[in-house]
Amino acid sequence: MKGKYMIVRLLVAAGLAAVVFAGTPALAVTAKEKMATCKFGADDQKLAGAARKSFLTKCMANSDAPVKQAKPKQVKPKPQT
């Protein structure tokens, strides 16, 4: 009997999770929300004038795609003498 109730609990929990996560898109952001985030970033960096404007322009133009990481430079080992 315990196993039967455990399966029912698991199915109910999975169903609730599906409903909750399906109703909230992960990367959907309105322009207003994005502008608020960009302004927060500019304020955090204490940007003003042309630097602030440039930052906000670049920030608003960025897509929601993940940032590409730069490949680390390979260092040649020093020859041992």
Image (spheres, rainbow, N blue to C red):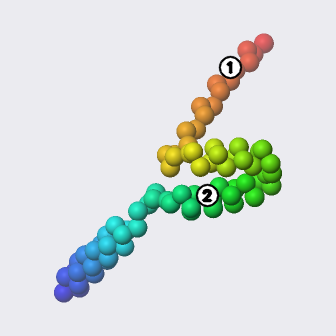
Q: Is residue 12 left or right of residue 76?
A: left
Answer left or right for 67 relative to 40: left
| Residue 62 against residue 79 in the figure, above or below | below
Q: Which mark is residue 60?
A: none
Residue 17: give x, y in percent of width and height.
34, 72
Q: Position of residue 51 (x, y in %)?
A: 77, 45
In the picture shown, does residue 67 fall above or below 43? above
SS at mark 1 in the image: loop
Q: Where is the N terminus found, in terms of image quarters?
A: bottom left
| Residue at x 65% of width, y 27% of height | 73
Q: Quadrant of residue 20?
A: bottom left
- Label 1 neighbour load within 10 Å: few <14, some 14-19, many 20+: few
1 or 2: mark nearer the eye: 2
Toward the top, the furthest residue is: 81
User: In whole angstroms, how far apart are the C-alphas of marks 1 and 2?
Assistant: 44 Å
Instruction: Pick whichever, 28 or 1, lies toward us.
Output: 28
Circle 2 SS class = helix
Residue under the image location 55 percent in, 39 percent down: 68
Task: Please tell me in which quadrant of the rendered image residue 40 appears.
Answer: bottom right
Q: Mark 2 points at which residue?
A: 35
Residue 10 in the image: x percent, y percent? 28, 76
Q: What residue type is labelled 2?
A: Met
Quadrant location of the C terminus? top right
For label 2, count other residues whose C-alpha is less than 10 Å away and answer few (under 14), some (14-19) or many (20+): some
Q: Mark 1 points at which residue?
A: 76
Q: Which residue is depicted at the point 68% across and 20% down?
A: 76
Left or right of 64? Residue 60 is: right
- Give percent across and percent down for residue 6: 26, 81
